[in-house]
Amino acid sequence: MNLESKEQPDAKLYGRRADVKYSLHLLRMNPIVLAGFFISIASILIALLSHLFINPSSWQAQNLDLRLCWNNPVFNWGIGNVFDCAGSVYPLGTDQYGRSLLAMMILAIPIDLQIALEVVLSAVVIGVIFGSIAAYVGGLVDELILRITDVFLAVPGILLAIVMIVVMGRSLPVLTLAVLITWWPFYVRLVRSQVLGEKERPYVERLHAMGASPTRILFVHIVPNSIYPLLVQATLDIGSVILTVSALTFIGLTPSPLLPELGNLANQGIQYIFTAPWLITFPGLTILVISLGFNLLGDGIRDIFDPRLRR
Amino acid sequence: MGIVSATHNNKLPDHASRMISLGGYSIPQFWFGAMLQILFVLYVRVNGSGLFSATGALATTCGICLPAPGGITAYTGLPTLDALLSLNFPYLWDSLVAVTLPAITLAITSIGALTRIVRSSMMDVLRQDYILLARSKGLIERVVVYRHALRNAILPAVTVSGLLVAYLLGGAVIVEIVFSWPGVGNASLAAADVLDINFLELYVLVTAVIIVLTNLVVDILYSVIDPRIRL
């Protein structure tokens, strides 16, 4: 059978390329992971192309005659249309100012994704630098870095972020920074534990004997060898960061109430939860789908690269 | 759920519980709370009125805002406990109903996280030799799984539940906003709005102390669950 010819021994025979092929094969075999893959790709594509779909200068156009309107052909949702909504053509209804919800949601996706990517990438970089140094140097440096992460881990992340934003002012960079502050300690710890295991391997000793500098051994050899769990965690965390960011903007820590950001849209929508339920439903659903997509993908990558489950 | 998932690896129960846990892991708490409100207040109706009240505590009694029904003494200021202490069962029921939806909302993420942990550690443990031994001794599957495997697989879950306390304390802020619950999370956000730094400092300090204490309890629990671990 076709399936058997792609077993592990074959992959070993033909080296790295067959390995990649085998990984792709595993990916194809798992429909759930594949779904996650497509959701992530689609959300990134929407984010990149959002300004082609929606004219960024026109989404703010208010149509006060058609506020809180959704001409739903299937069922009448909410307590009932307060306003006369004849002629409303917006696909997912309008908010309290008569702006199109769909347009705002499409414009919101790049903002959320951008924050998530910034936070995760910075956390990975910080984690790799401090975590690997902590593990490789050890001793007092290790102790110092670990205690600093302890300080940040002892406070609930959301609370720390709230305090940060309140003290430093409400803007997107501060929002990013506030989430990053709560996120980096996990990566430092993850990288540290990986490097601790990796630096005891024989090849490190061999590199020492060859006279390679510690910096080179650490960043050219050890770090690339211990990066896989980090990649999995980073993929999973894109979803979590989107959740955290939208939670923060949902409780009102948004740069501007008019900003089309998914949590902020939900915050505006919850005021009309029983008259216009779509205003909270769809932004929340978008967050759920995007974060589910990245979580499925990360989960799948973990399964695929886990040597214990591969065979 | 984690146990079922591990014992039925790659079968339907496994897929179902994995989907539920992943969903719980990636659902926005505030949205889940809002959806529960829409569902139970707008659509599920008992005797013509909503089963739950939308605003949770406020609509029944919160001990502080409204006088409690019947003779009730505020021993602790905690509605559920007060009702129990003064044997006022309608009030106890009220306070339990009021707490149901927020509690479910707060729990959904932790359910996802715990299921994943229990599943993976359970699958590890079920591969061990002593499980094979237990099976070959002729023990029934239930004893093998719950007596032998679970006790060894539960350790990581205990660790994570200790860490989850931090997460829940943070998440409480959001849930309190969604359900307009007059709790400390709402109060801290109000304090943040007017830059009441003293209040925020105290709140952060208190939560940090709670988290440190929880971790201490978790460490002590280790030695209860696994006698090999000496403190």
Image (cartoon, coloured by chain):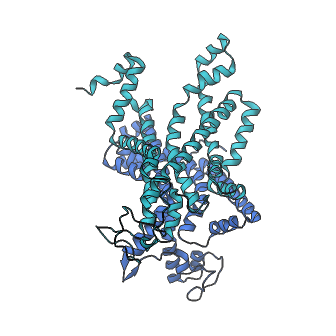
Chain colours: A cyan, B blue
The one of A220 and B135 positioned closer to us in this rendering: A220
B213 sits left or right of A234 in the view: right
Is residue A207 in view? yes
Quarter of the image where one finds residue A85: bottom left
Residue at coordinates 69% horizontally, 43% vertically from top-left? A149
Instruction: State whether residue A27 is above or below residue A265.
Output: above
User: Where's the C terminus of chain A, which quadrant?
Assistant: top left
**Total numbered badges shown on the rendered structure:** 0
Q: Which quarter of the rendering shows the N terminus of chain A?
A: top left
**Residue at horizontal 63 percent and vertical 16 percent from the top:** A205
Residue nearest the viewer, comparing A230 with B141: A230
Q: Is residue B140 visible?
A: no
Q: Residue A158 vs residue A71: left or right?
A: right
In this view, A54 is above or below A30: below
Based on the displayed image, in which of its 4 quarters is residue B228 positioned? top right
Task: Name the spot of residue A78 as percent of width and height, x first.
Answer: 39, 73
Where is residue A227? Give x, y as percent. Answer: 55, 30
Residue A143 in the image: x percent, y percent? 73, 36
Which x, y percent locates residue A150?
A: 69, 45
A12 vs B192: above or below: above
Closer-to-camera residue (A236/B164): A236
